[in-house]
Amino acid sequence: MGRNRHIGTWPRVLVVIVVVAVAVIVVVVVAVVLVVVVLVIVAVAVAVVVVVVVVVLLAVIIIIVVVAAAVIVAVVVTVAV
């Protein structure tokens, strides 16, 4: 009788092992997915920052060029007059 009970506990142990293994796999997969999502968000944020910086630099360059052109035109008009 004791032997039968001992044999009967093995399926329970296997079920516990399988459940724990599946739980660990699920936790690892969820962790990996979360890490990938965070990395994608960070990459998108960095890309947005880079785009904003480039646009601001282009705007500054355009403003400088326009101001320089206006100064040149003003100097030429002043000298011509």
Image: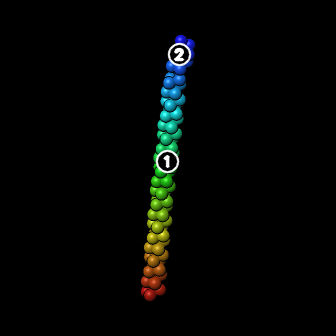
> The C terminus is located in which quarter?
bottom left
What residue would you read off at disc 1? 36
Q: Is residue 10 above or below residue 75?
A: above
Amino acid found under the numbered disc labelled 2 = Arg
Determine which of the numbered discs, if any, sits on residue 54 in the image.
Answer: none
User: Could you say whether the residue bearing mark 1 is in a helix, strand or loop?
Assistant: helix
Q: Is residue 24 above or below residue 77?
A: above
Identify whether 43 is placed above or below 64. Answer: above
Q: Residue at x 45, y 77 (%)?
A: 69
Rendered location of residue 78, percent (x, y): 46, 83
Residue placed most toward the observer, 49 or 34:
34
Residue beneath the point at 53% across and 20% down: 7
Distance between the alpha carbons at the discs numbered 2 and 1: 47 Å
Does residue 61 appear in the picture of this structure?
Answer: yes
Q: In the image as oriented, which residue stretches furthest toward the bottom?
A: 80
In the displayed structure, 59 sits above or below 69; it is above
Residue 5 disc label: 2
